[in-house]
Image: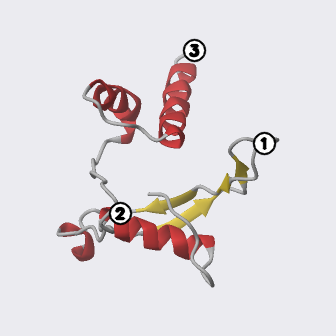
Amino acid sequence: PAGLIDGGETFQEAAMRELKEETGLVGTISGHTGVQYLSPGLTNECVRTVNIQVDLDANENVASQQSLNDAAFIEVELLPLNSLYSSLQELETHGFGIKAMLYSFAQGLEMRSEFSKR
């Protein structure tokens, strides 16, 4: 999930709100990054990545429902971490748009797996 921080909201609160709105899921924050600039020198647009642990068996997540605004179209796909990179590649072949940060995360996991074999 991604979105803007509403007035009076912390970035952690925004992350939890966006997760609930876009996926219907709730979870617990387990960590976050510092500020990450997307195009330093070109724009001051920045993001933070917030790690949220989600228990898919929790009562509030079993029958989760998105609450998207009329302009949003987001399809939720639950993918295993151990095959995230190949799963994203497969989705891309079917016309799905993959967020760059998610692809980068998956590439990092894939690289860790490859380097640990050496």
* Rendered residue at 52%/38% (across/down): 100
**Picture coordinates of residue 55 (x, y %)?**
33, 64
Using residue 51 as the reference point, say whether residue 96 is left or right of it. left
Q: Spatial distance from mark 3 to mark 1, Cα to Cα?
A: 34 Å
**SS for tag 2?**
helix
Residue type marked 1: Pro
**Picture coordinates of residue 109 (x, y %)?**
51, 33
Label disc, if present, on residue 40 of the rendered structure: 1
Looking at the image, tell me whether mark 3 or mark 1 is earlier in sequence order.
1
Q: Spatial distance from mark 2 to mark 1, Cα to Cα?
A: 28 Å
Label disc, if present, on residue 6 of the rendered structure: none
Looking at the image, tell me whether mark 3 or mark 2 is earlier in sequence order.
2
**SS for tag 1?**
loop
**SS for tag 3?**
loop
Q: Dot 3: few (<14), some (14–19), or many (≥20) neighbours within 10 Å?
A: few
**Picture coordinates of residue 4 (x, y %)?**
56, 66
Between marks 3 and 2 in the image, the one whose residue lies nearer the viewer: 2
* Rendered residue at 29%/66% (across/down): 70
Between marks 2 and 1 in the image, the one whose residue lies nearer the viewer: 1
Name above or below for residue 32 compared with residue 39.
below
Residue type marked 2: Glu
Q: Residue furthest bottom?
A: 8
* Rendered residue at 33%/29% (across/down): 92
Name above or below for residue 22 compared with residue 88.
below
Q: Which residue is mark 2?
A: 22
Residue type marked 3: Arg
Q: Dot 2: few (<14), some (14–19), or many (≥20) neighbours within 10 Å?
A: many
Label disc, if present, on residue 118 of the rendered structure: 3
